[in-house]
Amino acid sequence: MAIRRGRGVAAINYPTGMNLGGDPTQALVHSTPTGNFMVTLSSVDLGQGMKQIMAQICAETIGVPTDRVVVDTADTDTGPHCMGTFASRGTHRAGNAVIQAAREARQVMLEVAAEELEVNASDLETDGQGNILVKGAPQKSISIFDVALSAHFKRGRSISGRGMFLIPRSYPEKETGAMKPSTCYAHACTVAEVEVDDETGEVTVLTVKNVFEIGRALNPKMVEQQLVGGSWMGISHALYETTEPYYPNRDHGGTDFNQYLMPGPGDLAETEIIVLERPSADGPYGAKGPGEMCANPQIPAVANAVFDAVGVRIDTLPITPERILRALKAQAN
Amino acid sequence: MAKVPVQFTLNGSEKAEFIDSGTTLLNALRDKIGDTSPKGGCQQGTCGACSVIVDGELRLSCLTLAETCNGTAITTTSGLAEGGVLHPLQRAFLDTFATQCGFCTPGMIMAAKVLLDHTPNPSRDEVVEALSGNICRCTGYEPIIQAVLTAARANSQNAA
């Protein structure tokens, strides 16, 4: 009986969005009378940072500072349609819709500015600081504040735009079964090092080293935050979490936080996160969906590390001490 | 059933309410007084989201009867900022990206405050121990541990 070390590696290929009768998200953008911009969405921010990312995307597209954009996700009854925040789809689907809406709003904004400056709208550019300038003659300019006032009170224009991003439903080809059920794949690879006590079956994850390829990281600190939390969650799914330990039998499933196990702050593996940015062709400013993907590669990596340590293949999650001991016993017989 | 009077200070201001006997401190704070910073997670003392400070000690407000808090001084996360300036712990939670959905954050901050009040320069192990009664789903804990260590460093620099 001994504590045995093992190392495992796993790589994953993870889609963005899903294929249930089409995958749409809508966005509406409009300016206030003082040249701030509202983004109206039904996509919900549940802590992953969607409001911040959508504000960045809208600001970048219109050409204003991010703090000039307010994102309203107030009500899924009255807001523009969104399939929801799941399947790592929020940034990709809503982001593309916001770009389309913001482009349309930007065009109206430039048209009003062109009337004020008596030039062609195609000769105008934004400075990203809240001003519209004539290309090549930046001394001729107007603030977006004044453009919005003019649109609202003088010219009777609505500086607004509509955006809709739709991935149509994909049906399998009859002959081959080939289909495209999802788009925009993110990738990850994890190496996990574990110790397995072959007397108790207990697994300790020592280190977990992750590389994530997530398109462009639109907000690098928030991406890192999500990846760190996701890496921890992956280990939690590999070793601890289940509502049905004897699946499909519900018996002995956890009913509260005393019984539903998750690693606490004292059980953390040494964690490393590396982000590879390979902008995607169809993502908003090159982004993919890092959300769900980042909690997946740790699971097969830990399973492979357990195999490396004690020579048993556990193919049912979570990899509990009981499952390891039963497998070791079967192997000995 | 007759209502029971309770009286305590909440974040420095006097509060007096009539409550049903058996009301938890969590429900009294949220539903009667309107301080929703303590969160009701599990309602059985296992998640820590409802943590508040009663006379300097960390308490699970979901397991504390409000009527046992008569005459006490209660602190919640909503009372930490002074004059619009965030408490060093709140600042550190923002700066280290230690919050995502935010549901555990007030309880985490309460647990961390009690630690730093007693142990201004804690070791990492002491931080881990202090947070071990609080559950977080999003962050993987490491950013929260870093937030508490960051706040401790900021405090000691201000004191120096």
Image: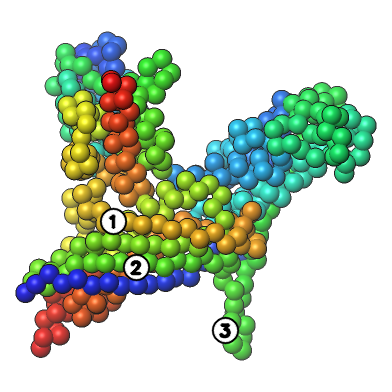
Q: Earlier in the sequence, mark 3 or mark 1?
A: 3
Q: Which residue is mark 1?
A: A270
Q: Quadrant of residue A199?
A: bottom left
Q: Which mark is residue A191?
A: 2
What colouring method underlies this structural image? rainbow
Residue depicted at 68% across the width and 49% down the height? A99
Task: Tell me how far mark 3 sits from mark 2, CA to CA.
Answer: 34 Å
A16 sits left or right of A125 in the view: left
Residue depicted at 66% across the width and 40% down the height? A59
Q: Residue B30, how many percent across, how many down? A: 32, 26
Pointer 1 indicates a residue of which chain? A
Q: Residue A281, how many percent across, how many down? A: 65, 63
Residue sitting farthest toward the top: B14
Task: Tell me how far mark 3 sits from mark 1, CA to CA.
Answer: 43 Å
Pointer 2 indicates a residue of which chain? A
Under mark 2, the amino acid is Val
Residue sitting farthest toward the front: B160
Instruction: Determine whether the residue tagged by mark 1 lies in a helix, strand or loop.
Output: strand
Pointer 3 indicates a residue of which chain? A
Under mark 1, the amino acid is Glu
Instruction: Determine whether the residue tagged by mark 2 lies in a helix, strand or loop.
Output: strand
Q: Is circle 2 on the same chain as circle 1? A: yes
A282 sits left or right of B129 in the view: right
Q: Earlier in the sequence, mark 3 or mark 2?
A: 3
Above or below: residue A91 compared with residue A155: below
